[in-house]
Amino acid sequence: MRKIIKKLINFFGYDIIKHNSKKLNFDDIYKMFFNDNIVIFDIGANKGQSIERFKKIFPKCTIHAFEPIHYEYKNLLNKYSKEKNIILNNFALGEKKNTKEINLAKRSGVSSFNEFNKNHIWIKTRSKEYNTDVENFLTGRETVKIDTIDNYCLENKINKIDILKIDTQGYEDLVLSGARDILKKNIISAVELELIFDDTYNKFLTFSDIEKYLNENFRFSGIKNYNNNLFEGINFFSEVLFINKKLINKILYK
């Protein structure tokens, strides 16, 4: 029957082409460029979600993980201290070396150096998920240390970063500001970060805030949207991927 249908379609001048509906995610893209022995910076490691993700893709990779919140760092130590390829750091990365207060929340992954907008629907919704109100969803402040990517790479003699992943709740631009020297050396292959466009915090970012640091060496290469506009849903943000042009040229124009 299938052959009869195909012949009938061909008779009218058409053909059947199998369509591959699989869409590439960021991990699929990474596999196009990297082998197993790569160096990854996980900035905003939280509970180790990205550590597990990258270990699954590249089991032999070296991960430098940065988590400033002390109790989450202790949890990471309990999970990964025996793994020699995972280097855990209990400080944040930013634009300069100093100390700063971070605003904490019951959902630790949304803790931020930026102030929460207590009137935003996002924080009201998240508070209800934790069976509390906004005031109790916010659990206080903690003074944490901040260093820069430039200092860290210099002190640890790191001469390449294959994947730079940044999830710092609106602090991504300042993390890149502290990597100016490394970016000029053009030794970063991929930058993956979160862009929050709404008013969850007292600061939001745009593409231009990020791209001014990535200069002419990177090309915007991927996006994963969470809602696609500012006017519906409880939040509006994206995960975005920039790939170094020297790698892109090897794939697109080989």
Image (spheres, grey):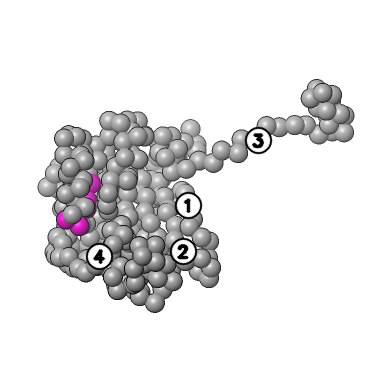
Q: Nearer the viewer, mark 1 or mark 4?
A: 4
Q: Tell me which label, 1 or 4, sits earlier in the chain.
A: 4
Q: Which residue is mark 3?
A: 19
Q: Tell me which label, 3 or 1, sits earlier in the chain.
A: 3
Residue 55, above or below 104? above
Task: Give the residue drawn at x 31%, y 40%.
Answer: 52
Q: Tell me which label, 1 or 2, sits earlier in the chain.
A: 1
Q: The residue tagged with tag 3: helix, strand or loop?
A: loop
Can residue 91 be seen at all in this image of the molecule? no
State the separation of the CA atoms marked 2 and 3.
31 Å
Residue 115, above or below 31? below
Residue 4, above or below 165? above
Task: Give the residue drawn at x 86%, y 29%.
Answer: 8
Q: The residue tagged with tag 4: helix, strand or loop?
A: strand
Q: The residue tagged with tag 2: helix, strand or loop?
A: loop
Point out the residue furthest to the left here. Answer: 155
Q: Amino acid at mark 3?
A: His
Task: Give the residue drawn at x 32%, y 45%.
Answer: 50
Task: Give the residue drawn at x 50%, y 36%.
Answer: 253
Quadrant assignment, res 201: bottom left
Q: Amino acid at mark 1?
A: Lys
Q: Tell me which label, 2 or 4, sits earlier in the chain.
A: 4
State the separation of the CA atoms marked 3 and 4.
47 Å
Residues shaded magenta? 65-70
Residue contact at pointers 2 and 4, CB within 8 angstroms: no
73 or 136: which is nearer to us?
136
Point out the residue furthest to the front here. Answer: 131
Q: Which residue is mark 2?
A: 236
The reply to whether the magenta stretch includes residue 119 is no
Q: Which residue is mark 4?
A: 104
